[in-house]
Image (cartoon, rainbow, N blue to C red):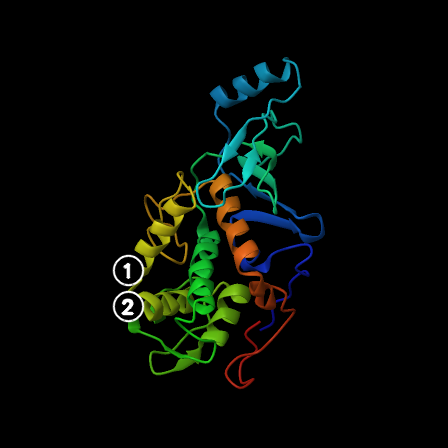
Amino acid sequence: MRFFKLPITIFLSIILILFTFTPCFAIEASSYIWSYDSYEPVSSTVNNTLANKSTEDKSTESESMEKDTTKTSSVESNSNNELNLESASAILIEQTTGQVLYSHNIHEQLRPASVTKVMSILLIMEALDSGKISLTDPVPCSENAASMGGSQIWLDPKETLTVDEMLKAICVNSANDCVVAMGEFIAGSEEAFVQMMNDKAKDLGMNDTTFKNCHGLDEDGHVTSSYDIALMSRELLEKHPTITNYTSIWMDTLRDRKISAF
């Protein structure tokens, strides 16, 4: 079974496969956009609000916001959905400065699905770059990790993969079993890793976000916003650019080429 991906200059494949959010990264322009596709009709209240706004002056107002952790300014504009997007939420930011170039319902709390893995990958990369773990470390698979379901590579509790192999499976195949195994490997348990995710979200100013798990399978209270996704995605690309070694993989195999996982 093979999975094909577009190059990193167009899409960040971490969150391209089986995600409910649709990301587009324009690396050369140092900007990227997040949009969330809603499967429910927009309420009449929202429709009326948008209709009223459409008759108003289209000029935008900008305000500067300084984030505690990045110490950079961002500008959030009142876009009035000028792009006529069908998604419930969208944001376009400039990667280097964090400036918001386009916004549409950017603080609406929605279910992130496997976009959750952006935060999981961020914590994995922090552990790697700090020397806490290495790419060659063997990572065991617990019964808990093997039972995740959804997008996975069907880990067996009797096998181990290296951190390098786990990252490939997570970034390219959105493997729920592998991200749970990595969380347990780094923090000792999935619960402890999820607490690390929420602590990091707080540090980044992700005020719309609460993580209940590290893989993104639907769970009550597991929510984030397009604005918060932009924050953690920028942190990942700015602080850990080597992640593109994995997100730019066109195709690969695991387990001594016995299984074409991607």
Identified by mark 2, the residue type is: Gly
Q: Which residue is mark 2?
A: 188
Residue shown at 39%/64% (left/top)? 149
* Residue 253, above or below 129: below
Residue shown at 44%/53% (left/top)? 116
Residue shown at 46%/80% (left/top)? 136
Residue 182, quarter of the rendered image: bottom left
- Nearer to the camera, 82 or 228: 228
- Residue 151 in view: no
Residue sitting at the far front: 71
Residue shown at 49%/69% (left/top)? 167
Q: Where does residue 110 sit, x and y in percent of width and height?
A: 44, 40
10 Å neighbourhood of mark 2: few (<14), some, or many (≥20)? few
- 198 vs 130, left or right, is left
Residue 205, quarter of the rendered image: top left
Quadrant including the C terminus: bottom right
